[in-house]
Image (cartoon, grey):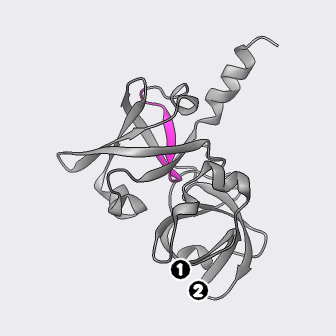
């Protein structure tokens, strides 16, 4: 389990068949083989480690549902280690189970913040409500508005500077994970 509070932005150093090698600093402190780590919001398992890099494998399911296949050496990725018992939970419950990708369709400055609008598929939009949580590339964010096919988030300067949103561009694909509690409520209320 994760919180959606990005610890650092790492850099992809190598792309391997069905895997990535990522350079990082902060998350390396206690990262070990077999640990879970969120990479752009996708929960992955550390399969190799050096002093400055770690490697993860990518399953076909992960490649189908995420933007990780589009990464290349030099790509910036959001990194978060799994939540340890007793840690502060500053974001929301993020499983690292990406539901789908969305496409960044607009960036609108609003005072010091930037309003980011993301077009998302119906299987995501059905759970999007104003003031609800959503994880975008693993970042815990709050929905500020939506229509039938897209939603908006307001990104404060700190979040933009300390995540891969600092280099986001129009048309970019982002990983989306809706609030798991919304899925449970839907399931409990549906017949059979």
Disc 2 target residue: 52
**Dot 2: few (<14), some (14–19), or many (≥20) neighbours within 10 Å?**
few
Separation of disc 1 and disc 2 at Cα? 7 Å
Point out the stretch of residues depicted in magenta: 130-140
Q: Quick check: 68 above or below 3?
A: below
Residue at the farthest top position: 191
Q: Position of residue 94 (x, y in %)?
A: 61, 46
Q: Residue at x 42, y 45 (%)?
A: 103
Q: Residue at x 34, y 63 (%)?
A: 167
Q: Quick check: 42 above or below 121?
A: below
Instruction: State yes or no: residue 115 in magenta.
Output: no
Q: Dividing the picture into quarters, in which one does residue 56 lie?
A: bottom right
**Is 85 on the left or on the right of 68, as rendered?**
right
Q: Position of residue 44 (x, y in %)?
A: 69, 62
Count up the numbered dots: 2
- Does label 1 or label 2 sit earlier along the sequence? 1
Residue at the farthest left position: 111
Could you say whether the residue bearing mark 1 is in a helix, strand or loop?
loop
Q: Considering the image in quadrants, where does the C terminus appear?
A: top right
């Amino acid at each position: 389990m994760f919180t959606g509070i990005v610890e650092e932005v790492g850099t992809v150093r190598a792309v391997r068949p069905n895997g990535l090698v990522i350079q990082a600093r902060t998350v390396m402190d206690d990262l070990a083989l077999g640990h879970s780590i969120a990479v752009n919001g996708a929960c992955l398992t550390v399969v190799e480690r050096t002093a400055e890099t770690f490697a993860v494998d990518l399953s076909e399911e992960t490649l189908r549902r995420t933007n990780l296949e589009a990464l290349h050496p030099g790509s910036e990725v959001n990194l978060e280690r799994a939540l340890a018992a007793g840690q502060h939970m500053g974001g929301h419950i993020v499983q690292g189970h990406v539901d789908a990708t969305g496409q960044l369709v607009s960036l609108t400055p609003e005072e010091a913040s930037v309003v980011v609008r993301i077009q998302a598929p119906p299987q995501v939009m059905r759970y999007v409500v104003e003031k609800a949580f959503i994880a975008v590339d693993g970042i815990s964010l709050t929905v500020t508005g939506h229509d039938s096919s897209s939603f908006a988030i307001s990104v404060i300067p700190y979040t933009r500077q300390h995540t891969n949103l600092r280099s986001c561009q129009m048309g970019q694909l982002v990983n989306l994970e809706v609030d798991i509690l919304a899925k449970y409520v839907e399931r409990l209320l549906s017949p059979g």
